[in-house]
Amino acid sequence: MDAMGCRSARFDLVHDRRMTDTEIPVTCAGSDSFLAVTGKPCRAIIPSPMDGSPIVEDMPAAPMPTASPSAVRAYYLRKNAEILHRYGPGPQVHFHAAVMTGGPPHDGTPAELRRRIVEGQTRYLDRCADIWEAATVFRGRVLDIGCGLGGPAIYWAQRFGVEVTGLTIEPAQAQLAAQLADDAGMAHLVSTTVEDFTVAHPQGKFDTAVSNEAFVHMDRHAAFANASRTLPLGAYLCIEDVLLTKPEGKAPADRYWTIDIGPLAEYIAAAQASGFTLDRNVDVTAEGADYWLWSIAWADSQLAQLESEDALTEATESRLLRSIREHARMYRCITNNVYEFRALRFHKVRDLA
Ligand SMILES: C[S@@+](CC[C@H](N)C(=O)[O-])C[C@H]1O[C@@H](n2cnc3c(N)ncnc32)[C@H](O)[C@@H]1O
């Protein structure tokens, strides 16, 4: 086991080092995530994974990536099967962070590690529910904005007996989520709808809205405005998301996750412009940080298992190695305060003009 808790040294962790204006900030670069984050050509210097000697890579200027709705839709169309494989089999399939317990990941099989991660994801929602005072605030009809495969929607319905509509931009995802809700025996409370929430909001009345790690994909002003159009005065909008705390973290994260990560101030400004005030704001970064180590351990164990079964294709190996590198980068960035995770609660105090 190495320092990151992984069995093998397959992935090349970049080390902290001082940054100059011509070097990419390697605390948040993965070797295949290199972008000229400044929009100018730049040079990355990283230690070789083999012997630590410096590798120099010159990179051309790259345009800042964007998470256009069509790019997000295409991303999830590709990603659905992978999410199901990695966090399934369900019926509650989550695609958000987790609160892990019991120290660093042990040498488990992929199935064991996955089971522990899914338990941790449920603990993460327990924690969000406490922060949001969901037992009081979630009532009547709840809109889950960016519902993924429906794990949180099923959880909210089961735990609080509320009617939840899961909204996603990707049609196949909505179908899968509806099927999983049915498998959970929750079809009477959980339904799904397909909408680009930056463009339109669902018809019908909602009492509360919730969103886990989805606003990060969206134009915040448009999404808060649509949340305001959806909710009555006095309603709550509960958001848990990953936020940017240092600008150098933006380009690599945006590119890998097809997001448009932004700082807390941007959420607050967009919320205020749409008639919301922020009334709960809790930093949950430290509580969820170990999740990334467990996720790396899962991918590492999955690689080892496929290799031992002689079933590892080149494409799968490259995807899993990339995931390991990116999750290692994410862990390093979190511990270097480049990103933070927050549970926020907004209260609608004014209608949109
Ligand atoms: C990281 S996943 C989170 C899924 C789910 N909330 C969970 O925690 O398991 C982000 C979700 O946001 C949805 N999403 C992203 N942009 C969207 C948009 N413009 N309109 C509606 N849904 C969107 C994606 O389709 C996906 O379901």
Image (tube, helix red, strand yellow):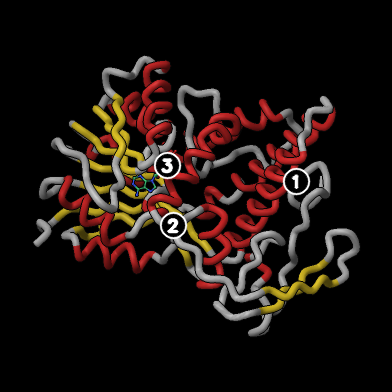
Marks 3 and 2, the one that precedes in the sequence: 2
Judge the density around disc 3: few (<14), some (14-19), many (≥20) Cα neighbours within 10 Å: some
Dot 1 falls on a residue whose secondary structure is loop
Q: The N terminus appears in which quarter of the rendering?
A: top right
Distance from disc 1 to disc 3, alpha carbons, whole Å, reads 25 Å
Residue occupying image coordinates x 54% and y 48%: 288
For residue 251, which quarter of the picture?
bottom right
**Relative depth, front residue between 37 and 109:** 37
Height in image: 135 above or below 236?
above
Q: List the residue tagged with mark 3.
A: 127
Amino acid at circle 3: Arg
In percent of width and height, residue 48 lies at: 84, 64
Amino acid at circle 1: Gly
In percent of width and height, residue 52 lies at: 86, 66
Marks 2 and 1, the one that precedes in the sequence: 1
In percent of width and height, residue 350 lies at: 11, 58
Height in image: 23 above or below 72?
below
Q: List the residue tagged with mark 1.
A: 5
**Which residue reaches farthest bottom?**
21
In percent of width and height, residue 65 lies at: 50, 64
Amino acid at circle 2: Ala
**Relative depth, front residue between 105 and 43:** 43
For residue 303, which quarter of the picture?
top right
Marks 1 and 3, the one that precedes in the sequence: 1
Judge the density around disc 2: few (<14), some (14-19), many (≥20) Cα neighbours within 10 Å: many
Residue occupying image coordinates x 37% and y 17%: 182
Q: Is mark 2 within 8 Å of ligand 1?
A: yes
Q: List the residue tagged with mark 2.
A: 67
Residue occupying image coordinates x 58% and y 40%: 100
